[in-house]
Amino acid sequence: MLLALLAWTARADSLVNLRRADLPSLPMAAQGLAAVNGRAAAFTADAVWLLDAAGQHWQRQAWSPPQAVQATATAAGESVLLLGANGQTQAAARLVLQQERLVTQALPALPLPLREARAALTAEQLWVAGLDAQGRSQLLQLPLQVADARWLVHPGRPGAAKPRAVFTQTRAVYVVEEGAPDRLWRWTAEAGWEARGALPGKLAGPWARASGQAHGLFIVEPLVGGAPRLMSWQTITQSWAELPDGALSGVAQALPWKDGWLWLDGAGKAATLEVEGGKLLLKPLDWVVIVVYLASMLGIGLYFYLREKRQSTAEFFVGGRSIPFWAAGVSLYAANTSSISYIAIPAKAFETNWQYMTNNLIAVGGLMFVAVWIVPLLRRLDLMSVFSYLETRFHPAIRMLSSGLFMLTQLGSRMSVILYLPSLAIATITGIPVTWSILMMGLFTICYTALGGMKAVVWTDIVQLVVKMGGALFAIGFIVWSLDGGVAEFVRTAAAENKTHTFDFSFDLGKATVWGFIFLVLFDVVLTFPKDQVLMQRTLSTRDAKEAGRSIWAFAAIMIPGGIVFYTIGTALFVFYKAHPERMNPLLSIDATFPLFIAAELPSGLTGLIIAGIFAAAMATLSSIINSVSTLASVDFYEKLVKDPDPARSVRFAEWMTVAAGLLGIGFALLLSRYDIHSLFDVSIELAGLLGGGFAGAYTLGMFTRRANSPGVAIGVATAIVLTTTAWSFSLLHPYLYLGMSIMLCIVVGYLASLFFPAPTRSLRGLTIYRQDAVE
């Protein structure tokens, strides 16, 4: 009932504005436009006019290209010219500026002449579509950053319609072909050519370009007449939206320019039209909700700081081993569902489908094995650092190396992404720069983690799980109620677009398949769960081995319904924005889709609740990582290297390391924010595989073999890291497979190398899963 009262049909007004700016007029009409070094160049019959850097006046230069310009391709302020004669394109050349003079730099000649050629340019590739001498469609590709590059010829589109425009977006090439109305085609290396429907009119010229990570901007003439208009097309939902005040009366030439277009009319008048996203500020009630949440988290940390007179590392790191199994299980799930789950997974489901949900389903089976065999074994050893096992089983150097790599993985791979994603959400909603958002969230998390220790981490995790799951469920309900057709429209659209497709049984190593997830779960969950100090620290905080195993069962019980919630958010967002494309911002990344909905569609107060959920998702994992890294720094390094360490001094060192770990994570997040990364979800997986897989296999060798020894394991870890990094540099596998590959290499190479050294002579009692080593 509450949702019915609060939901409303999305407004038809756009979330973006168009900013117009006049430029100096050309003294004559231009025959074409291009760009060089971020400056516009207009071609006339015998000259080229170059706009100065300040955009104040045009400078005339004599111009005599080697062949006639047939078309141009422009991206990021640079252009490539297609050259030829008699309507045929035979060559391509870069347009460059040398001492304020425009010249061309020849590229390899086309492998065959093309008529009606159109091109698209990226930093790495040049794409050309056209018709060959027999009138057949052709698609050519030229790598631009490869020495002695050659053209690649791909199959052309079905039919022989003329291409009107070409652009690229998110690893795909789009071609607008002539028709009534014009039609759109998409090409990818995996799927080939796919029809993407008709334009809402006729393209006014070869004027289509990419915007953001999932939009195209088109200058379209309505079929019923009228001035050309600027329209956006969403590549995922395949929905069109007319941008406000986007009329371009009299447009004769157009050039992709910053976030929009630079255009000329027939008389030489020049202007720019750029897309601007508006600021969506939080209301006072939203800030009240957020402040109450943050204050309560800080209060819990302060409560445990005042209550627990910490004089031992056991109190600070494992809560005195008094955490109930159910609380440890809930905390395990809370730590495992970070801002990656809250933002990146809905974005992944919005962009694709539910194939990544397969990982959750298979992982539950893996966790059952972990609960019975692995966690009780380690809990019986009364560890604080899981890497202590590697010292007992192998050698202190293996322990310290693995612990150090784990800390680097957590700070560089997980904490940086988890900090950056909610900071992106805050920036989208409030306009606060991402840098400041990262600093604010990171510093706040450092404070409450340093105050409370493990008990504060676990009990705040429980509160945070309630907040973030409550916010996620409300978001789903709100989106569905906001649809004109309600639940029926949601189900119908999701089914028609196959958005809940989950299982892919193909054997394509470049895709997220069932076999790939089985491979991943086998190596990352079943065999190497103990490598994760963040998760294992909760099981080590329980009363005994039986309680530790129960905590894993509780974790597994929450994983599937929790995963369904986050993937449903992505599907609901797809249905909503397919119906209301005007409510999207073409400039934003795909990962900003859910934050955009939160900011633009939810009522005051409820927006604050969802933002608190994003904070909760991030802070639960951030505090866990910081606490775990400080634990490892204290137990694996400080207490090993300092003679006769005093317990109280160890705790103080851990508190300072909490601050240091948090600051390092902030630094990595700031570095990550400087790059345009398509999917942070994939990035986090890749980094975990490259940095974390090598040492993970050491646990498998230790627990599941009796023959593995220290030299063999060291060789296995080093080999795994080197070979996995090499495979990653050549993009040989799907991002999900690098971790499994690294672990498998460590196991195979480490075991074989161990055969060349003497078998272990130390007692293996309590260190393997075998009965002869069991502890009664």
Image (cartoon, grey):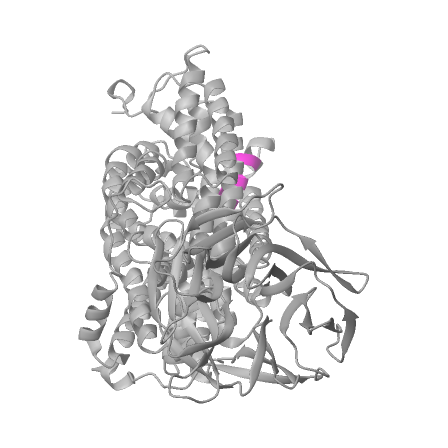
Q: Is residue 122 visible?
A: no
- At which x and y percent is residue 371? 26, 39
Highlighted magenta segment, given as a residue range: 630-637
Q: Does residue 666 lie above or below 705 as drawn? A: below
Q: Is residue 75 left or right of residue 699?
A: right
Magenta part mainly helix, strand or loop?
helix
Q: Quadrant of residue 528?
A: top left
As for residue 656 lying within the magenta part, the answer is no
- At which x and y percent is residue 440? 56, 66
Q: Quadrant of the N terminus?
A: bottom left
Mark count: 0
Q: Is residue 655 visible?
A: yes
- At which x and y percent is residue 552? 27, 44
Q: Quadrant of the C terminus?
A: top left
Q: Does residue 363 lie above or below 397 as drawn? A: below
Name the one closer to the observer, 734 or 281.
Answer: 734
Q: Does residue 157 lie above or below 34 as drawn? A: above
